[in-house]
Amino acid sequence: MSQTIIENIFSQYFSSDSVWKQLEEPEDVLIKIVDALRPKKVANAVTLLPIIEILENNSAYLYNFKNYLTYLFKDRTFVEMLIDVGLNSPNSFRKELLKKITYKILPEYSDSSTMKHLLD
């Protein structure tokens, strides 16, 4: 079902490069794609396979979709997003990124006799 909806969205907006450019709110197309991909039941997993298949089988869709995503994200700032995840300044980005990667590989050691260990 979602495959058909996604195919309809791609044929409507990405068969030609100029279709989505004529929209007043080009972001709405991305919202439609996400809504079609999002499972109706919470327990179901999200899969990108329908989009991957469509893009692999149609080079015009692929080219126009790349242009669309580039248009949407090229001038957007993401400072607020970085602050929300705890990266307060550009200087701390590398330090925090390294810290998050390290904790994924080697979990933080906490001494069981500390207050921090008790509250965590």
Image (cartoon, grey):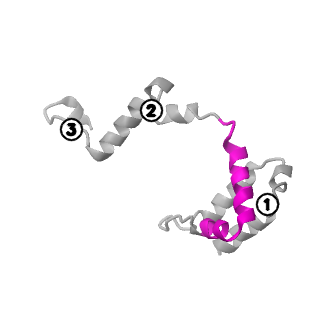
Task: Identify the mark at residue 1; answer none if there is no mark.
Answer: none
Please say if the residues under marks 1 and 2 sit with CB atoms less than 8 Å apart.
Answer: no
Q: Please say if 82 is above or below 44.
A: above
Identified at 20% across, 36% down, the residue is 110
Residue type, mark 1 in image: Tyr
In front: 88, or 65?
65
Was residue 32 drawn as part of the magenta stretch in this picture? no
Residue type, mark 3 in image: Tyr
Residue 52, located in which quarter of the rendered image?
bottom right
Does residue 89 appear in the picture of this structure? no
Residue 108 is left or right of residue 14, and the answer is: left
Q: From the viewer's perspective, is the residue at label 1 or at label 2 nearer?
A: 1
Please say if the residues under marks 3 and 2 sit with CB atoms less than 8 Å apart.
Answer: no
Which callout, 1 or 3, points at the residue further toward the start of the chain? Answer: 1
Identified at 20% across, 30% down, the residue is 115
Residue 9: x and y in percent read: 74, 65
Residue 19: x and y in percent read: 84, 56
Residue 13: x and y in percent read: 79, 60
Task: Identify the mark at residue 109; answer none if there is no mark.
Answer: 3
| Residue at which label 1 appears | 13
User: What segment carries the magenta color?
Assistant: 50-76
Which callout, 1 or 2, points at the residue further toward the start of the chain? Answer: 1
Residue 51, located in which quarter of the rendered image?
bottom right
| Residue at which label 2 appears | 86
Q: From the viewer's perspective, is the residue at label 1 or at label 3 nearer?
A: 1
Label 2, residues with CA under 10 Å away: few <14, some 14-19, many ≥20 = few
Does residue 37 appear in the picture of this structure? yes
Q: Please say if 117 is above or below 90.
A: below
Identified at 48% across, 26% down, the residue is 88
Identified at 73% across, 45% down, the residue is 71
Q: Quadrant of the C terminus?
A: top left
